[in-house]
Every structure is written in C-alpha cells, then in structure tokens.
Image (tube, rainbow, N blue to C red):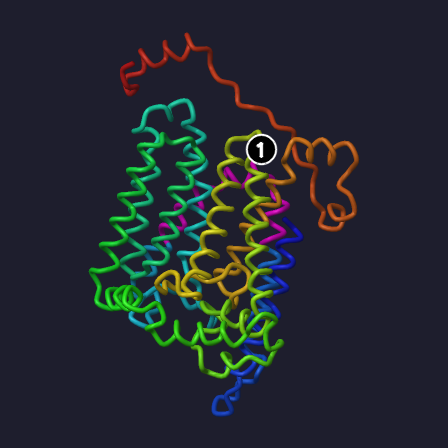
Amino acid sequence: MLALTGILVLVGVVMVLSASSVSSYDPRTGGGQYDLFGKHITYLVLGGVVFWLGLRLPLRRIRAMASKAMAVALGMLVLVLTPLGSAGGGAQRWFVVAGQSVQPIEFAKLALVLWGAHVLVAKEHLLHRWRHLLVPVVPVTLLMFALVMAQPNLSGTITLGVIMLGLLWFAGIPGRLFAALVSGAAAGFAVLAVTTDYRLVRVLTFLSDASGSYQSTQALYALADGGVFGRGLGRGSANWGYLPGVENDFIFALVGEELGFVGCVAVIALYAGVAIVGTRIARRALDPWIRLVAGTLTLLVVVQAAINIGYVVGLLPVTGVTLPLISYGGSSLLVTLAMFGILANCARNEPEAVAALRHHGPGRFGWLLRLPAPPTYAPRARAPIGERRRVATTAPSSPRR
C-alpha cells in the first residue's frame, strides 16, 4: 500500500508539472509557470501530514471520532449553502479559506465511510433484520444526497451512493435487497441527470456521440496523438489550452498523450494494484469495523478512478470526478491521502502484521515515522443469549421478538 501510494503521488507530481507549466504562466497577472505546481506541492506536503496521522493514530481512536466527523461533515454541507459558501460556475460547493478553496463533499465521503462502518458494526447482531441494516445509514446518506444536490453536485452524489452501497455490501446485505437498492439508485441518478438542462444536454451528447463535447473530443485527440509510447514528457499539446481542465479532470488524457498507451496501462495497473491490496487487507482483517472501512475505501478509490478514466476515453458521460492522487491537488488530494493512510494503518492491523510488529519491533520505517505497535484484536464480549432475551423482553423500547 505504501509503494502504490508513493508511485501514484510521484506520477501525479510529474503530470501536474507538465499539465500546468503552460497554463500557469500569465504575464498580465504576473503568474509564473510553476504557480499551480507550487500549490500542488503545498497540498501534497499537507497531505503527507494527513497521511501520517491516518497511519499513526490507533484505529480505535479513529473509530471513536467517526460520529463527530459525521456531524462536522453534515454541518459543512449545510453551511456551504449559506452566504458563507462560495459560488462559481453555477454551483455553490466551496469555502474559500485564505484564498484557497475547500470542498466539504470530499470530507463528507471519508466521514460517511468511518461513521457508516461504526454504526453497522455496533448493530451487528441486529443486521439480520433489514430495517436495522438500512437505518440509520440509508436515511443519513439520503440527507447528504439532498444537501449535495442542492449545490448542485451530481458527481459527489454518485460517489456518496457508491459508499453507501459498498458499506451495505461488505456488511453482508442480502442479494435481493442489494439489487433493489442498486436499481433504485440507478433510477434516481437517471432522473437527476435528465431533470436539469445542462446535465440533459451532456447525456444526450454522449448518447449521440461520445466525442461530441469539446473536452471529450480534445481528450480523444490527445490519446490518439500519444500512440504506443507517447510524445514524451512536456511535449504534449493538450496543456497548451487545447484541453480545458487538463490538470484536473482530464489529466489521464495528458498521460496518454505524453506517455502513450504504455503509460495509460501502467496507471490502470496501479489502480488495479490498489484494488487487489485493499481487498486483501479487508479479507484478512479480524475486526469487522476494519473490514468494512478497508473494503469501502478501496471501492471508493477504484470507482473514482474508473469513472474518471471512463469519461476521458469516451465510455461514460463527463461527470467531473478527479483521478485519485494524480489530478491537481486540493481537498480531494488531502482526503485521498488520508484514505490511503487509513488503509495502510488497516494493513498494519492484520493478524500476522500485529504479531511481527509486536515481536520484532517497528522496523526502520516504523521507527522513522514513530509508529506505535498495533494492539492485538480482542472481540467485544456479547451477553449470553438468555440474558439478551431477558433484556429484550423487559426493556420498553425494545422490539418484540
């Protein structure tokens, strides 16, 4: 996980430098060619601190903060719709702090993963009843849907839906109920996509011609120009203004132009590695909360990468989802690095890793980062069946059996 994180960050640094060196230069405002790259490095340094915290903090402490993080995230989603939020491009999705924009939806994604896993694990003995399986995770997620769509932000809503379905899947939701939820979510997103003029135009353009929009056309030109081995770093034409947003949503097109088909396959292989390693971490975890968090975070990162690559190559409508760790930094980079830090922390809590770290010590890497030895897993004791039945029948708020 550490190697995958480092390689993806390195690829992002190189590609952001290549993508922004031209667009950053503006003699009218005095902007230098490394301005955007400098901001990206600043975000990366802050993200490194967040990554270290996610790796170092005990997972039980991160779980204890889940409810507070969810309350803060909901508060931010409400406040961004007030005059405290900043509007631009027909949407109100940001706070501007010290001249830097902050997107609360990015923090809400991580908060929903941590809180949703906490709730589902706390109600583990009741999850055989579908009402306890869905409540309160689904209602709270629907509330977040409404707040995010009020911005409006369909891509953020889609990623929240992925998180909700991922949590329920890893919690062991029955197949029929999961299929019903997926069908309902797909229908809901389809309705949202066609009820607004600009979204409807985008969908109709995609259905009639995947390369119909200007950005999609230029992205395909960039991929075609790259050929097998690419034109070389810094030699692409997409970053000369031909492809708007090349350092953000369409940076994969520049990867294809400058590094070619080989570079694209390498980037896809890195995300496939994240999927394999993250799934392995979730499968090996003894703690059910770690299993849910690791599985859902892995799903979120991989799905975001798949959506971004999908619309760049013309397989999906353009939605505005960034490529994790490779697109230009900001709130997305900070939160994604926090996710990878937590995933690496989950890996340190695998049974074999715990035994090795506690027996042989933290090693050079652990000593350098001052990483404490992970605790041994102790499952929470549950009351005997007879005791649980007695409580269920005597407590006035308990449902009948």
The outermost residue toward the front is 228
In this picture, is 177 found above or below 125? below
Task: Please give left or right for residue 83 compared with residue 123 in the image.
Answer: left
In this picture, is 77 found above or below 381? below
Q: Position of residue 31 (x, y in %)?
A: 53, 85
Quadrant (top left/top right/bottom left/bottom right) for the C terminus: top left
Where are the magenta residues, as a range? 50-75
In this picture, is 232 found above or below 319? below
Residue 54 lies within the magenta run: yes
The outermost residue toward the bottom is 28
The outermost residue toward the top is 386
Question: In the depicted view, which residue is nearer to us: 329 or 171?
Answer: 171
Q: Which residue is mark 1?
A: 285
Q: How many marks?
A: 1
Q: Main secondary structure of the magenta part?
A: helix
Tell me the residue at 43%/32% (across/down): 171
Tell me the residue at 52%/77% (across/down): 225
